[in-house]
Image (cartoon, helix red, strand yellow):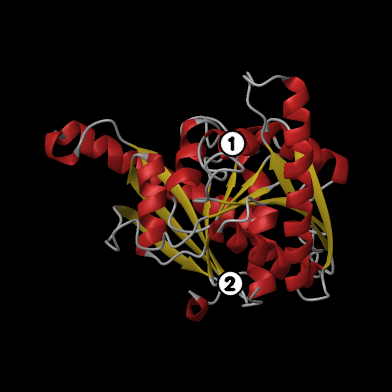
Amino acid sequence: MSGTNIELKRILLPTDFSAESAQAFPYAVWFARQFGASITLVYVVPTTLPAELSHIGIVLEEKRLAKEAETTLAKVRDRELPVDVAVENIVLSGGPYYEICKTAGALGIDLIVMSTHGHTGLKHALLGSTTERVVRDAPCPVLTVREPFLPIRFPDDTPCRFKRILVPTDFSEASADGIRHAAWFARLCHGGITLLHVVESPNYPAWGYAHLSLRDQKLKKKAYKKLEALSGELPPDPAVVVAVKSGDAALEIIEAAKEEKADLIVIATHGHTGLKRMLLGSVTEKVVRLAICPVLVVRRNERNRWPIENARIVHRKFCGDPHRL
């Protein structure tokens, strides 16, 4: 398996100004420092009517909200993000999910970092429909963060938090992308990887449970051999452990993350069978919603999914070193 380095120069960090959405900030800062990347801090002023139907009152109200958002966003940047990281503040107007994805495509974003708990602003923000739709359709990998609130600190030597990484795989080309990302992060963090395959059982086996148990044993044995082969293709660093489970894919992934005390789950989308459309759709959304650790969703060849066009930017301001943006 190729050990190609991961290109990560531009990070998109949506916020709705809630303390919960700020949970994603330390992760964006770690990535920015580790890769020498810049952060685009974005807030979306939601609109309910298309521009062509707007009358003067709605236009003025949108401008007022955008002006307030500019001020608040500048305060958030100064309060929550360290001065050594290059940051671009952007205020957008429109539908939150659409504007986030479109902006990511237009600016050539390499990673979106989002909290999965928030309120209003980005439509109960980023939990529920907005996060799930961004995860499903973004033109780049998405890191979702869901964890209890902790004070945010930025020491000069921001520690790497990805020591134990769980990587579900269905042995597809898409899941190979996820393994490559996980291996790269594990090397940076001097951590380890657990490769996991879940054998899904039919809800109502027509041939009886005894036959089903025998089938699971055969599939598990075959999966172990494939996982061992995969681990052999990875460099000696990081350390790799393999695991095979049977049952509901999403629930087994979440349970394995708890058992392994995983710091990160890396899921690749656009696969086939094995993990039920590899992990796009209900499995991915359930893992993102319920996992106690951050989840990195890696898309395959989706850079051109969104047109490279100018997003509807209401306000844009550069902070830090503009040459890094």
- The answer to whether residue 14 is left or right of residue 251 is left
Q: Which residue is mark 1?
A: 283
Check disc 2 and give the amino acid type: Ala
Q: Residue at x 79, y 35 (%)?
A: 255
Residue at left 28%, top 30%? 48
How many numbered callouts? 2
Circle 1: residue type? Val
Q: On screen, 37 above or below 277? A: below
Disc number for residue 37: 2
To which quarter of the image does residue 64 belong?
A: top left
Query: Which comes before the other along the chain, label 2 or label 1?
Result: 2
**Image quadrant of residue 230?**
bottom right
Label 1 residue SS: helix
Q: Where does the image place residue 51, in percent across and percent down from the top left?
A: 18, 40
Q: Residue 171 in the image: x percent, y percent?
A: 63, 55
Disc 2 + disc 1, Cβ < 8 Å? no
Give neighbour class at mark 2: few <14, some 14-19, many 20+ (Cα, 10 Å). many
